[in-house]
């Protein structure tokens, strides 16, 4: 179910996060099995969201209509069952406790954020278009408006720079904006390294970055990949704060 799961207290006090994989859900066929894509297309997505929400112990999983924009949606007053507001955005930020911010991906880069005081969390969908347009910078700026504490970011599974083949003009255009993205595939053709670009951009902004970016294209048993199958499902990055910063899994020892 999870390629990475960090419970509150594992890293940042009062913050939990996870990157899902494709295992442990109810979807069939090319969506098998933990597809967290659009509800209207695969009828099992609703069940899959419930499986993940319960596993993480959250009130709600908030999703948006991802359009490769730099729009950041700040979630206020989330209520039970509010699964999919009709908001066009590619990043989510909240200070609401126990509300999971969910970003769907299948080769694009999921980036999760938390302030080190545990008071604000964020999630961003950084594909080529959004990354170059500045969706991560917009997320960081929004979070810094809500907490003065230093920020951390976790980069999740996505297509790697050895695999993300693009036409040469596209590679050059990306490298002009973000030089760290310049890459070459293992078979010698132009490529873009989205993870390196995200890492460089966030580090430049003073954000502490952790990379958990296994390649989605070369591990089809574990991950959905749009490059492998255009009808693929979606995995997700999810982050939440508990509002209880003194709490950790080791609380019983205190
Ligand atoms: Zn790869």
Image (spheres, rainbow, N blue to C red):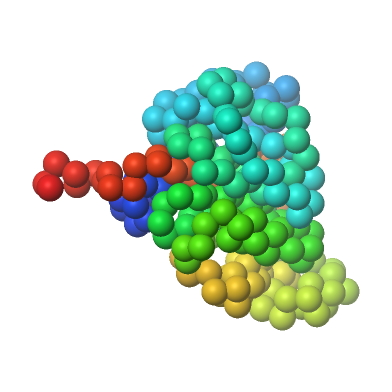
Q: How many marks?
A: 0
Quarter where residue 27 is shown: top right
Residue 125 visible in this rendered orientation of the protein: yes
Q: In the rendered view, does 239 fall on the left or right side of 93?
A: left
Q: Nearer the viewer, residue 147 or 14?
A: 147
Identity of the residue drawn at 66% across and 28% down:
84
Q: In the rendered view, does 249 fall on the left or right side of 158?
A: left
Q: In the rendered view, does 218 fall on the left or right side of 66?
A: left
Task: Please state the horizontal and vertical placement of residue 104, each as a whole percent of the image.
Answer: 63, 42
Identity of the residue drawn at 48% across and 55% down:
114
Quarter where residue 215 is shown: bottom right
Identity of the residue drawn at 69% across and 74% down:
181
Task: Please state the horizontal and vertical placement of residue 249, each as a whole percent of the image.
Answer: 24, 44
Identity of the residue drawn at 79% across and 63% down:
133
Q: In the rendered view, does 50 fall on the left or right side of 232?
A: left
Which residue is farthest left?
Answer: 253
Q: Nearer the viewer, residue 13 or 125?
A: 13
In the rendered image, the quadrant that contains the N terminus is: top left
Can you say whether 9 is above or below 201 in the image? above
Residue 238 visible in this rendered orientation of the protein: no
């Amino acid at each position: 179910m999870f390629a990475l799961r960090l419970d509150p207290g594992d890293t940042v006090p009062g913050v939990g996060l996870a990157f899902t994989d494709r295992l442990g859900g109810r979807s069939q066929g090319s969506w098998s099995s933990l597809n967290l894509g659009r509800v209207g297309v695969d009828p099992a997505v609703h069940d899959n969201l419930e499986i993940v929400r319960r596993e993480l112990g959250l009130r709600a999983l908030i999703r948006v209509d991802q359009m490769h924009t730099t729009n950041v949606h700040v979630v206020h007053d989330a209520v039970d069952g509010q699964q999919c507001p009709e908001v066009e955005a590619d990043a989510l930020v909240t200070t609401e406790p126990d509300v999971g911010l969910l970003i769907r991906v299948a080769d694009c880069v999921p980036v999760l954020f938390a302030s080190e005081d545990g008071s604000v969390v964020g999630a961003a969908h950084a594909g080529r278009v959004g990354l170059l347009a500045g969706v991560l910078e917009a997320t960081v700026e929004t979070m810094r408006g809500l907490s003065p504490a230093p920020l951390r970011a976790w980069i999740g599974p996505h297509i790697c720079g050895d695999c993300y083949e693009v036409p040469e003009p596209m590679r050059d255009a990306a490298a002009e904006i973000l030089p760290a993205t310049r890459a070459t595939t293992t078979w010698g053709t132009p490529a873009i390294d989205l993870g390196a670009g995200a890492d460089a951009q966030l580090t430049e902004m003073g954000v502490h970055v952790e990379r958990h970016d296994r390649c989605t294209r070369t591990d089809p048993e574990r991950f959905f990949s749009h490059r492998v199958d255009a009808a693929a499902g979606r995995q997700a990055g999810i982050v939440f704060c508990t509002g209880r910063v003194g709490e950790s899994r080791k609380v019983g020892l205190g």
